Image: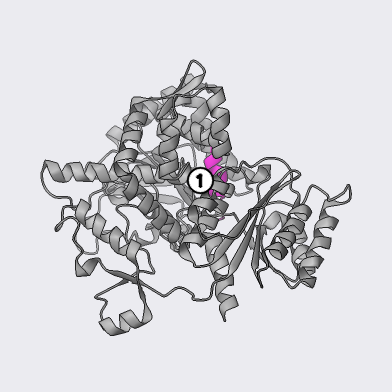
Amino acid sequence: MLRNEGVFKSVGERLALCLEQVGAARLGESTVISRSVHLIEVKRPQVVKIMTSADAGQVFYGRRVPGTVCHIDIFHAVGQVDHRNIADAIRAVVHSAVGENAAWILDHMDLQTGTGGGRLSGTLNYGREASVRRAHANHVHLATEMDPALFSLFVPVVVAIEEEILRQKIEIRQVEKVVLENPPQSAGGTADLSPYASSTDSYLREKTGQPHSGFVGQRASDELQKLNHTLQLARETLPPEELLVLLRNLPQGSYTKANLEKRWGDLEQTLSRLEGSKYIRRERGRFVLTEEGQRLMDLLEQHLPELESYFRQMLRHVPWENAANLGFFEPEAKKSIHLCRPGRTGTEILRSTELDLPGTIFVAARRWLKLRGDVGRLEPTDLRYTAPKRRHQQQIVLVLDISASMAGERLRAARFLAEHLVLATRDKVAVIAFQEQNVFVPDRFTRRLAAVEKQLLALKAYGLTPLAKALKETVAFIQSSRVRNPLIILITDGIPTVPLAGGDPAHDALEVAKELAKLKLKLICVGLDPNRQFLEELCRHSRGRLHIVKELEPGILARLIHGELAARQR
């Protein structure tokens, strides 16, 4: 429960009335709220134009019915406002204010700043295009679908955002004037919104895709939307088949839960996500399926082969910009080449490319679901080709820090990377994970996705960082495997905190790094900026290479590693 709830409720009621009668409102000095598109004049940045003829839901999300999406902009001095910290502030307020209803609200609230954005309940790995980030360099953008009875929630949300902006040492900017405009719809009368175009994981989008007319077409469209939602849920929890196994194991008590944690180390977070989305609920000390959860399980059982196929497709294409958004209604991967591409003969295509079978099936299945053509029959326009994979197989040792600070999205990103390397390359992979006094070493290198997935899903991030021991065990594993010139990839978000034998953890790690250099083992380290100084020293001692990233994200990690693999082929 929030303090000043009565005041917030009164403001919320006035805000709803203002939007209904006027079409826009200013909240405090920095914030503008409407159901339309907002534009800022270059020469007068303190003046905000409300384009009353451009409905926010229709323009941003392709909605048929206007007036369903609220558009909120909080203005500040030009700067890089960290969208993840903003998201944390919003989540805290929403959970405090509405409790069990928070999950639905966060599912239907999108965020964008000058550093990125996405759905509040999602990965926040979207909105990274340079044009989008530039367009939001002076304001925090929110879009949400919310009942007017809950408009009082906007007040504490805006306050929390302003406080977070100030905490990041960026000034709040005053909006001096709000202008309502209704431009003519003639040629040239519509504002250019292309800088705001971005891939997204929003649940506010309306899926159209030109469905077949009539009840059957609408039913197919609804089914696609449910499949897309399930695919996104799998991204944030467990792969489709594993998610189905978990749902089948409910209801469960503490004893069963302990057994399940051996299979899924991140079980607590997965259950929390399912409970927040109202797929499960607590009943007498155990989790049981809700009606919505039963429908989810039925959908998984009915469409498991398709969901598994699309999930692997998503993992395979994770390096490319739109990969995180790959779904049943998304465009083909950027590296896919259409058979009838102008200027290239069939001979030239076949000589320089390979048939992308998953991509081909993906395109055909999407056409079948839209009731176009005979189901089960491929058309020439379905065929997709990709650049041929590298022929020389390499061995990759992925050394993963799974200490406490790697919990959540960071560990999930590392898991996606390992699975991606198995699916997208012909290289053999071994995953070595470390935490506390433990280093988990596999029996051998593998090309089997099931083996890598099983190992990674069982991991739970906690404890300290025994880096020296992990590197020493890595050397031993490589020597026992008798492989030549493997690529060692260390992914960590911290510095060593556990020594080998009561000494200094950092010194011990640097000494083992020297052994890597003597054995001519190639080390690639990916880490975060706060630990740059130590990681640079580690790479100097090992004669390796360091990549510093802002955050450990699947696309960033995959692109870095593909670059390293390509460099070794030259």
Residue 107 screen position, x and y as percent: 41, 38
Colour theme: one colour
Question: Which secondary structure, mark 1?
Answer: loop
Q: Nearer the viewer, residue 33 or 544?
A: 544
Where is residue 126 drawn, in percent x and y? 45, 53
Q: Amino acid at mark 1?
A: Gln
- 53 above or below 341? above
Classed neighbour count for the residue bearing mark 1: other residues with Cα under 10 Å, few (<14), some (14–19), many (≥20):
some
State the residue at coordinates (31%, 48%): 61
Magenta includes 132? no
- Nearer the observer, 217 or 47: 217
Q: Residue furthest right?
A: 503
Residue placed under numbered mark 1 in the picture: 174
Q: Residue furthest left?
A: 214
Is residue 26 shown to the viewer in this render? no
The answer to whether any part of residue 551 appears in the image is yes
Give, as a single range, the part of the protein colored magenta.
79-89
As drawn, is 198 to the left or to the right of 566?
Answer: left
Magenta stretch: helix, strand or loop mostly:
helix
Residue 85 within the segment the image draws in magenta: yes
- Up the image or down, 42 lies above or below 465; here it is below
Q: Residue at x 19, y 41 (%)?
A: 219
Percent position of residue 497, x then y: 79, 47
- Quadrant that contains the C terminus: bottom right
